[in-house]
Each structure stands twice: as C-alpha cells, then as structure tokens.
C-alpha cells in the first residue's frame, strides 16, 4: 500500500535524523533504514533529500498538533481548550527528544524548515479557534476572525517560549488565558471573571 | 565600546571609528546578507582599510556581526522605551511601543534582508528559548514605564507580563512577513484599536485581598 510505504519512509527519515542529524542524513541512509531501494525513495519523493526532509518535518509537526487537538477535544470551554493546549503542547515540546536534539545541534536548518510550515500551522489553529469562537458570546465589537487569528499567534508564541509564565502550573496558565488570551475576546472572561454562564447565541 | 542608545543606521559620518565600521557592517548585510559580506566589503563601506577593521575588531567578521547585532538590539529597546516614556495611559503606552517597534524593524534593511533571504541567521533569536533575551530586555526597559499605568498592587508583575506580550506581538505580527495579518501595526488608529481590544481588557484590577470568591 502506497500510504504505508510513504509513512515508512517518513518514519525512517526521523530515525536517521535522530542518529545523524538533518544535514548528514542521506537518501541511502533512509532507504537502508526503511529496507527499501533508493529508487523507491525517489519514486515517493522525486525532489530527493530536500523534499524528504521537508515532508518529514511537516509530517511530524502535523502529528504533533493532531495530538494536541486530541488532548484538548474533551474540554468543554474555549478557555479550557486553550489552557489544556498550552499545558499539554508545551510539555510535549519540552519532552520531544528529537526536536530538542536537532534544535540544539542544527537550529538554523531546523528553524528554517519549521518556518516554512508555520503559515500552515497557524492557519489550521486559526480555523479551529474560529469554529470554537462561533459558539461563544464575544465582547461587542470584536471581530471573530481577527480574534481567532490573534489567539493562534499568541498560542504559538507561548508554546515555544513560555517566558515568565509557568506552563506546567494550572493556576498560572488559567490566569494567562483569562487575561492575555481571552480578556478582551470573550464576554465575561476578563479579570472580573464571570465563568459558567456563557449564552450560546444562535445566529 | 559605545553604549547603544541610537541605531547604527543613524551613525553620523564623524562617529567614532568602531561605530562607523559597525554601521558599515549593517549596510553591507542589508545589501548582500551575512554569508556574502566580506571584511573587504565592510572596510570599503566604512572608508578604511581591512587592516584598520582588524585592528578595531581582532575577532573578524563573527565578532563584528555579534557586536553590530547587540548594539542594534540595545538601541532598539532604548529607542522604543523613550517613546513609551511619553505615553499618557496604558493604551497609549502599548500603542506607541507597537508602532515604534514596527516602524524601526521595517526600516532596518539588514534585518529585513535576513528575514527575507537568510532566515536561518535570524530564526534562532526569534524562536523557542532564543527569544528569552528579548523578553528579558523588554522586562528591563519597557516594563518599568508601564507600571505607572497599572493598578498599584500588581503593577510590577502585570507590567512585566505586558512587556513580554509586546515582544510576542511584534514577533508574531510585525516581523512575520504575512499578508494575512488583520491589524496594521504601522497605522496608529488601527494599532490603538488592537491594543484596546485585546490587551487592555485583560489587565486585572486592584484586588484588596486574596479573597476571590468564585461559585
């Protein structure tokens, strides 16, 4: 099955990158790791090494955010989803051995690759949040699309860099979400705190 | 070494030799990028000899790049802080910071060249923990100027948090070359709207005691 072969090659690339790094991983390494021929690798990735590396990173990023999405799905509120997304996502980044390894050894190559996939990631998160917000009462005057865009950017920023916020601490993350994330977006989400009474307006 | 309170882009022709060389370095990067710029290019742009450049910066190109970047970052925060210092209230302070920061980053040819053509050079300082020095600088320079506009009981903490928020917004909106951004951080009215919509309402009011009774 072609889907299987493709996944096998992507997984093999990850294994090679873990062993040899981004720059030194070759098509031969990946073919050997996957137990396939060079020709097969080229059939699936005609762009060769560059395409293989780039698609492997995109694949891993997509898998990462799919796990985040799965993790947050059970949370009933927007605030809860963002809170869980921050806590789970940040921990997953810290504990992602391969990411941390390549980030330390080959930051330029990895970050350049990641930055090419970041508009896509941002777009997916923005779309997700936009849907989520459509069931909420927003502060009058707030544009839902702009709010979703803002939240997506802020989320990605905190995911990579917590700064002075302890993203392992539920109370800290709760305050962050209540202030910078939703303080101006959701009616009743600000410092005053009026949880529990969202009016799901049908429009 | 001169303490940077002004961008090297504005270094006058009679500036000290080291500043002229650093300024020339930035001009070269703005034209050719980091990889292609040579010490000969820098010497020529500075109007001096290669030997003079080496005497002033014995470490060569790497040291030049590092010192130019350090100078520009410190100058950037000093300049933005000076603008924030003149603000009348919190919304004005945050608006000024975003406008001033965006304007300075957009006109910075060296930075813009790297963002567009050599992102690998700049990304380690704008992603993951690489951002931390920028967050620290904002907390040191801009946060104290925000405190006066915040509820007294929590002013230092909320000011530090908002100073970091500014860095995040600038990196996510102003530096990111992204046409989809909904807010125009070069436009004063739009920037003020953005700030009063998303940041100001999140400020927590003074709380007399720790008794936050919630249902």
Image (cartoon, coloured by chain):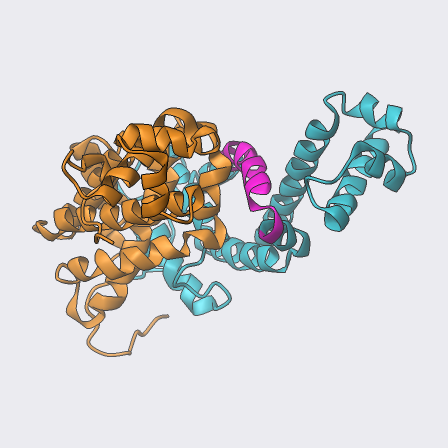
Chain colours: A cyan, B orange
Q: Main secondary structure of the magenta part?
A: helix
Magenta region includes residue A192: no
Q: Give the percent coordinates (x, y) of residue B131.
A: 41, 52
| Residue A200 appearing in the image | no
Q: Give the percent coordinates (x, y) of residue A23.
A: 68, 39
Q: Give the percent coordinates (x, y) of residue B191.
A: 22, 37
> Residue at (73%, 45%) from the top-left corner?
A17
| Residue B80 appearing in the image | yes
Q: Give the percent coordinates (x, y) of residue A53.
A: 69, 34
Residue A15 lies left or right of residue B1; in this view the side is: right
Front residue of B61/B170: it is: B61
Measured along the vertical axis of the image, is residue A172 above or below residue A76? Answer: below
Measured along the vertical axis of the image, is residue A202 above or below residue B81? Answer: above
> Residue at (57%, 60%) from the top-left corner?
A91
> Residue at (33%, 59%) from the top-left corner?
B136
Q: Quadrant of the N terminus of chain B?
A: bottom left
Magenta part of the chain: A104-123
> Residue at (57%, 58%) from the top-left corner?
A88
Residue B26 lies left or right of residue B118; in this view the side is: left
Measured along the vertical axis of the image, is residue A43 above or below residue B167? Answer: above
């Amino acid at each position: 099955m072609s889907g299987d072969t493709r996944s096998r090659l992507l997984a093999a690339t990850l294994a090679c990158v873990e062993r040899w790094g981004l720059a030194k991983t070759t098509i031969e390494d990946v073919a050997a790791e996957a137990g396939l021929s060079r020709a097969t690798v080229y059939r699936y990735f005609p762009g060769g090494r560059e395409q293989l590396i780039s698609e492997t990173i995109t694949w891993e990023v997509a898998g990462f955010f799919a796990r985040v999405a799965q993790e947050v799905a059970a949370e009933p509120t927007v605030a809860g989803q963002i809170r869980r997304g921050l806590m789970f996502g940040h921990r997953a980044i810290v504990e992602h051995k391969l990411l941390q390894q390549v980030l330390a050894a080959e930051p330029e190559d990895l970050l350049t690759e990641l930055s090419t996939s970041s508009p896509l990631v941002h777009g997916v998160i923005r779309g997700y949040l936009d849907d989520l917000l459509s069931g909420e009462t927003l502060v009058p005057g707030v544009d839902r699309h702009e709010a979703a865009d803002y939240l997506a950017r802020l989320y990605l920023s905190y995911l990579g860099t917590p700064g002075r916020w302890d993203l392992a601490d539920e109370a800290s993350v709760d305050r962050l979400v209540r202030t910078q994330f939703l303080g101006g977006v959701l009616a009743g989400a600000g410092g005053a705190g009026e949880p529990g009474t969202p009016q799901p307006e049908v429009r | 070494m001169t303490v940077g309170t002004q961008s090297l882009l504005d270094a006058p022709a009679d500036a000290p030799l080291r500043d002229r060389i650093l300024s020339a370095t930035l001009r070269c990067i703005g034209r050719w990028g980091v990889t292609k710029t040579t010490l000969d290019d820098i010497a020529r742009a500075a109007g001096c000899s290669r030997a003079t450049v080496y005497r002033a910066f014995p470490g060569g190109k790497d040291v030049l790049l590092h010192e130019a970047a350090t100078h520009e970052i410190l100058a950037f925060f000093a300049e933005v802080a000076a603008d924030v210092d003149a603000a009348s209230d919190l919304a004005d302070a945050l608006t000024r910071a975003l406008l001033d920061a965006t304007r300075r980053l957009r006109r910075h040819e060296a930075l813009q060249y790297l963002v567009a053509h050599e992102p690998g050079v700049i990304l380690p300082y704008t992603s993951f923990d690489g951002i931390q020095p920028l967050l620290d600088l904002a907390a040191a320079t801009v946060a104290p100027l925000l405190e006066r506009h915040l509820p007294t009981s929590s002013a230092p903490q909320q000011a530090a948090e908002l100073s970091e928020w500014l860095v995040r917004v600038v990196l996510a909106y102003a530096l990111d070359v992204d046409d989809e951004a909904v807010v125009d951080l070069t436009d004063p009215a739009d920037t003020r709207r953005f700030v009063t919509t998303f940041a100001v309402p999140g400020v927590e009011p003074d709380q007399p005691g720790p008794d936050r009774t919630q249902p």
